Image (tube, rainbow, N blue to C red):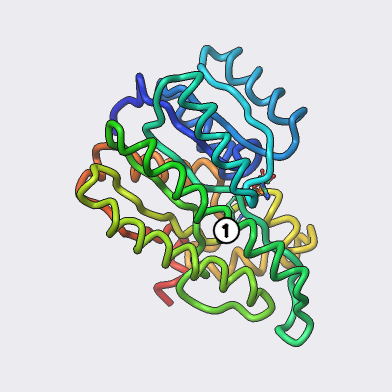
């Protein structure tokens, strides 16, 4: 996969779960990592831990659903590190699960503001910055970005939108030296999965069995796929939504 030495990487929602494992993967591969999130205490603790193992990086606080915040993150990266090479648009929420008949405008706003507006405005501000020298963007979608799931309609719709944004933005940047792809994970053991399943071990075991491999993924397995898409090994890939779901969608 090669090294990311000299590269500056932005990971949104990077203090927990898939984002955290991804930030660690890039840091271990020599990149300077900028992690964003809403909880400054958790973010600073994570960056201290990364620095303690010899990595370079910093934490930026804020809400990804606000364009002014995302714009400020990209400016701060350029000011502090002089460039942005790679962006991982990972921050996301599942919202309140339940049948369509119970969905509320408040839940729609929360999920779409974070998962769709957050990715849209991240792309908007990352693209001109990365275009200065070229690079790659990976959006974190989901296996439900191309299929339905009962009880998760708003989240599912938001991930369909992420796939659409990924494909459209990739077409716009294909000649600018920026590759834009998405990963579409199946069930991954993270705080989100805990919330999705109400921390119910039986529900989690059932969800694991719904994956043909008979288990859920670890965040590091998704991180490795994200690093691959961001690396030169994926040089001819853009506009792809790469499924990493233990066979779920092959059924
Ligand atoms: N866990 C799974 O099974 C699974 C499967 C497919 C896709 N995903 C996607 O992976 C991504 C990461 O989720 P995860 O599973 O690691 O869960 P997670 O809850 O640990 O991570 C989500 C991160 O996004 C941050 N975030 C949420 N809203 C934000 C906001 N408004 N501003 C800034 N940061 C915000 C959270 O604080 C958290 O750090 C999400 O986009 C999720 O939809 C997860």
Residue at left offset 49%, top offset 68%: 161
Q: In the image, 135: left or right of 205?
A: left
Residue drawn at x 62%, y 68% as measured from the top left: 155
Horizontal relation, residue 204 to residue 137: left or right = right
Q: Residue 111: horizontal and vertical position, in percent?
A: 67, 63
**Horizontal side, residue 242 vs residue 217: left or right:** left
Foreground: 99 or 9?
A: 9
Q: Name the quadrant containing residue 48.
A: top right
Crowdedness of circle 1 by 10 Å Cα count: few (<14), some, many (20+)?
many
Q: Quadrant of residue 31?
A: top left
The front one of 189 and 239 is 239
Callout 1: helix, strand or loop?
helix
How many badges with numbers are in the image? 1
**Which quarter of the image is occupied by the C terminus?**
bottom left
- Relative placement, left or right, of 11 versus 3 is right
Q: Looking at the picture, how far across and down is residue 109, in whole percent?
A: 70, 66
Give the image location of residue 82, x and y in percent: 41, 20
In the image, residue 14 sits, relative to residue 89, either above or below, namely: above
Q: Is residue 54 above or below residue 22?
A: above
What residue do we see at 70% from left, 70% from top? 108
Given the current orientation, which residue lies at the most extreme front position?
68
Q: Is residue 233 above or below residue 97?
A: above
Mark 1 C-beta closer than 8 Å to ligand 1: no
Q: Is residue 56 above or below residue 159?
A: above
What residue does disc 1 label? Answer: 117
- Locate the N terminus and report the quarter of the image it occupies: top left
Q: Which x, y percent locates residue 85?
A: 37, 32
Q: Residue furthest bottom?
A: 101
Task: Write the residue at 79% across / 82% down.
Answer: 102
């Amino acid at each position: 996969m090669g090294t990311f030495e000299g590269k500056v990487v932005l990971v949104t929602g990077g203090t927990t779960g898939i984002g955290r494992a991804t930030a660690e993967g890039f840091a271990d591969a020599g990149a300077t990592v900028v992690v964003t999130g809403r909880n400054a205490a958790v973010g600073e603790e994570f960056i201290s831990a990364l620095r303690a193992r010899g990595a370079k990086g910093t934490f930026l606080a804020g809400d990804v659903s606000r364009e002014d915040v995302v714009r400020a993150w990209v400016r701060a990266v350029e000011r502090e590190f002089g460039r942005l090479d790679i962006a991982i648009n990972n921050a996301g929420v599942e919202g309140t699960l339940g049948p369509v008949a119970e969905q509320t405008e408040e839940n729609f706003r929360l999920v779409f503001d974070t998962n769709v507006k957050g990715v849209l405005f991240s792309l908007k501000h990352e693209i001109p910055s990365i275009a200065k020298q070229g690079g790659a963007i990976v959006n974190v979608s989901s296996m439900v970005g191309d299929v339905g799931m009962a009880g998760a309609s708003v989240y599912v719709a938001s991930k369909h939108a992420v796939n659409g944004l990924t494909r459209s933005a990739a077409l716009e940047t294909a000649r600018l030296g920026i590759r834009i792809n998405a990963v579409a994970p199946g069930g991954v053991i993270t705080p989100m999965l805990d919330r999705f399943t109400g921390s119910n071990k039986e529900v989690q075991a059932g969800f694991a069995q719904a994956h043909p491999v008979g288990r859920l993924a670890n965040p590091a397995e998704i991180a490795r796929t994200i690093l691959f898409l961001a690396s030169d090994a994926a040089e001819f890939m853009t506009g792809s939504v790469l499924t990493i779901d233990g066979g779920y969608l092959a059924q």
